[in-house]
Amino acid sequence: MLISVQRVARSLGVLLVVVALTFAIFYVAPIDPALRMCGKPCSPEDLEAARGFMGFDQPWWIQLGTFLTAIVTGRTFGSADVIVECAAPCLGYSFQLHQPVTSLLADRFPVSLSIALGAVALQAVFGVAAGVLAARRQDGLLDRIVTGVSVVAASAPAFVVGLLAVVVFALRLGILPSGGYEPFAEGPLEWARHLVLPWATLAFLNGAIYARLVRSSMIEQLGLDYVRTARAAGLPERRIDSYALRNLALPLTTLIALDLGALLGGTVITERIFGQPGLGALLLDATSTADLPVIVGTTLVGSLLIVLANLSADLARPLLDKRLAHRGRAPGDPSSSTPTDQNPQETPS
């Protein structure tokens, strides 16, 4: 219990550092969002009034404290004549888009969630399967193909793979839309059709990591004594593979959680290529227009998702390890908790 509390406290500390660095970088940079609000011509008095209206007239550390407080209590922008309310949880207000940052993030998050879930599922399934097959046929033709494709995928730029997918499947073959997003509620089939290319692109790029990890780990596992003992006991190869994969459950769980958290925060290049209005596209647009409240809010949410995913993996590790320790193991598996955990029928005489 104490360890869990320490991990949560450490995660909150990481988020605080991320927000502080974001404020320090973007608010100290020679960018003044009040210039856009002030218009042209803009006198020094009007510029100062615009800064005060937007809350940019204080040192960045005071703005940071106000920002953190507004997450819980909400915030009011403006003056006595014009007031802009930002209800809690307030992550700032975009004066360029005339919306609270929280509303902008809520509108874009379902898109990033749809992309992240499908991409992580595809890259995990196909990456693990490719790694197992390559390990089973070490130094064979299939192993060389999987290794070669993994190297290409790991080194290929995302925009090249995405554009190639658009040219082949959307422009040449015409079997999939080149971009856009359809909400799930308006039609699951159209929702999936518009996401196939982003899913496939991200799965191809990130699945190589799973394939290489599983291949190297499986080769190591298949060379251990418990695998030779299991074969001598007459266990089928599929069952032996399942035993070996169980020993990879912990690193795979951590990798999947981190990938999911990162993708939930938005995929800037992929979303831009396929015209997906997710968090990544929102961050890119805000950066190009110096919309600092949106930049800070999006950065915070993206960091929060990654921290939560990492924290979930850490908290699940003891539970998952305990479940694995009490499940059936191959004869001679060194990860078995005790010799009595083995099935006597599977132990060779």
Image (cartoon, rainbow, N blue to C red):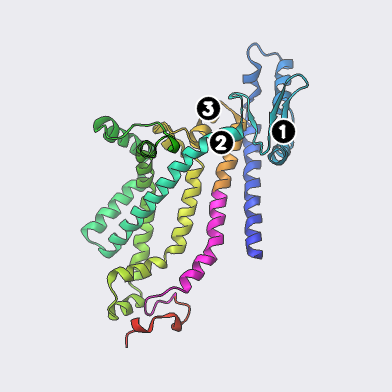
Q: Residues within 10 Å of mark 2 (few under 14, many from 20)?
A: some
List the residue tagged with mark 2. Answer: 105
Magenta span includes 158: no
Nearer-N-terminus badge (2/3): 2
Query: What residue is drawn where x is 53% and y is 34%?
Result: 107
Residue behind mark 3: 288
Quick one: label 2 or label 1, which is nearer the N terminus? 1
Marker disc for residue 338: none
Mark 2 and mark 1: Cα distance apart in space = 17 Å
Neighbours of disc 3 within 10 Å: few (<14), some (14-19), many (20+): few
Alpha carbon distance from label 2 to label 3: 17 Å
Q: Position of residue 14 (x, y in %)?
A: 62, 50
User: Is any atom of residue 156 visible in this view?
Assistant: no
* Quadrant location, the N terminus: bottom right
Q: Percent from the top left, x then y, of residue 179?
A: 37, 31
Comes first in the chain, label 1 or label 3: 1
Q: Nearer the viewer, mark 1 or mark 3?
A: 1
Dot 1 lies on which element? Answer: strand
Q: Tell me whether the residue at label 2 lies in contact with that at label 3, contact meaning CB atoms closer than 8 angstroms.
A: no
User: Residue pushed farthest bottom?
Assistant: 349
- Report whether 14 appears left or right of 203: right
Q: Is 18 left or right of 343, judged from the image as shown?
A: right
The residue type indicated by label 1 comes to Arg
> Residue 171 is drawn in which quadrant?
top left
Mark 3: which amino acid?
Answer: Ser
- Distance between the alpha carbons at the discs numbered 1 and 3: 26 Å
| Residue on which the image places disc 1 | 75
User: For numbered disc 3, what is the local secondary structure?
Assistant: helix
